[in-house]
Image: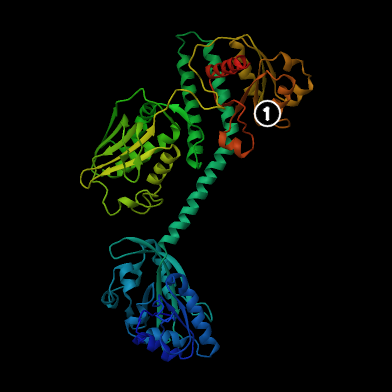
Amino acid sequence: MVNWADSKNQSSPQLDSLLKIAESLPVILLNVAPMNAEGAQSSPPGPPLLSCEGGDVRALLDISTRLVQRSLDLQGVGRSGLDDCLRDSDHGLMEYFPDGIVLRSPAGIEKCNSRFEEMFGYSEDDLRDPGFDLLNLADSSARGTLHALLEGEHPENSGVDSRVFLGRTREGQPLHVELRTRRCTSEHSGTEILIFQDVSKLVHLEQQVRQSEKLESVGTLTSGISHDFNNILTVISGVSELAMQRMEELDPSRHEFSLVLEAVHRASNLTRKLLSFARARPDRMDVISVDDVVCEMTELLERSIGADIQLTIDSESPEARVYANGHLLEQVLLNLCTNARDALPQGGQITIRTEVFATAEPYPLFDSVLPPGSFLRLSVRDTGSGIPSDILDNIFEPFFTTKEEGRGTGLGLATVQKIINQHQGYLDVITQEGEGTEFALYFPLAQSNGHRNGHVHPTGKSLHAKGGVVIVVDDNESLLRVIAKLLKRYGYQVHEFSDAAELTESGSTLFHIADVLITDVVMPGITGLELIDHARAVNPDIGVLCMTGYDNQTLREKDLYRNDLDYFPKPFTKDQLAQAVNSVLEKRETVP
């Protein structure tokens, strides 16, 4: 297997050397010359050739080696012909190999090719130095692996062994290397051929697969426990609020219970963040204030970036609203500020700025164009060293990183770009070496403060009892009792059931008089959706509110999401519950 690129049909010395040994053996030519005027392939004289114009050298290397060796074996030549050809030829033949080649004998290193020098930075003279040790090619953690491979016994009859180890270049840069050792079987039995293949990209690909599997596992685990976990949080929240209602305004215990409620809120947010991080798309989009998101993240960001970096928040549009997922925007801010922190090893300043940006003409950005319109511009600027121009085009590639191994995954900016695309937003990068970097995000302004169909959200309006009849169904009896007590405090007449079958078997009278049915979605026996269908068959005017501890994506995956229903996520406060019931009643009253 050689590279034949001579259009004048003249043999190269390296090819002549190979043909003298192989004679009538088939030869594979890679990257051969184009067709000649008569439409025939230019090829050297001699034995029949198997050509591959523009072939992938690395992909064909193992195939061609096995083919040549098979032909040698069939003709009784053995492996010595190919080994001796490589050993005894000048450097030219070795240069055709896409991997690093080193020939080692008991006397020391005999030769290496230029690809080896490119991979590790060591020249042939370096290798021949009596003081040089091949173990210098390995990271300190992998020297045992390399030593075992260089000094170990080869498998019987194969003469070949291979293993992957973590290597280090002369400059200390890491790379993953597969080393294949081959012992010559001719009279030069003491000579070994060492083939070093850079498999860093393959290792990174394997890491990507493992990372994806980890994220999927996080999502599966979080989704699986979120239902029960949110039920528990709802009970804790409800009992705490009931206790606070019985206390005097100045009772010191109220403060302790308020801390419990705050912890419930944080735990609920943590569950949503874990799900959002592991999901391929946002779970829920709302009309939100980006300024509020920034404000809530300030304390966490200050702790994340360190005391030697000053964080400045500059808000010029506190009233602006966008349609977005707040938890994902928090992740965007954290990723951008983490990147900015890493660009400030000696300290400096990070500025987060929000403002309304309007343009009447298309506005050019880093790799796209902002269309005419009004946008919320969120920017994160640092006073670091800037991004070098030679890597600027690669910064959003997944797993691309300039950080030391173990300090970064290369997912931060790729995740930011993915989230911005999910929000139909735009991304710009302004950077200059020595003057810092600014990432600017553009989100379309929301047209109103409405909410998505299918979701019930607290409205903030004053609460008042409607005097209605409410049926509550949940298989968690503790949660059922808490919800019933909360609703009774607001003047509702409540009928509670822990078993949906018990309700359906009690007859249709209760469904006829009920104004609202509140039911959990996932229950043993009759599910919440089946109960709703039964209730509507009896009373088409009954209002329905679905409580759920699952996020909407999990409901869709379980075939439990319907666009005609209002879903109310757990955990919730007493005020949120009352507002949700009021909202269902008002919606019911407006239906003709």
| Residue 323: % across, % down | 44, 30
Query: How many labels sit on residues?
Result: 1
Q: Is residue 157 above or below residue 187?
A: above
Q: Is residue 582 above or below residue 66?
A: above
Q: Which residue is found at the position 51% from the left and 10% from the top?
A: 247
Q: In the image, residue 483 lies at what x, y percent?
A: 61, 19
Percent coordinates x, y for residue 46 in the rendering: 44, 90
Can you say whether 387 is above or below 166 in the image? above
Which quadrant of the rendered structure holds the C terminus?
Answer: top right
Provide the residue designation for mark 1: 528
Horizontal arrangement in the rendering, residue 410 relative to residue 172 (left or right): right
Who is closer to the viewer here, 262 or 6? 6
Helix, strand or loop for disc 1 = helix
Q: Position of residue 510 (x, y in %)?
A: 74, 16
Which residue is outermost to the left?
434
Q: In the visual, does 212 lie left or right of 44?
A: right
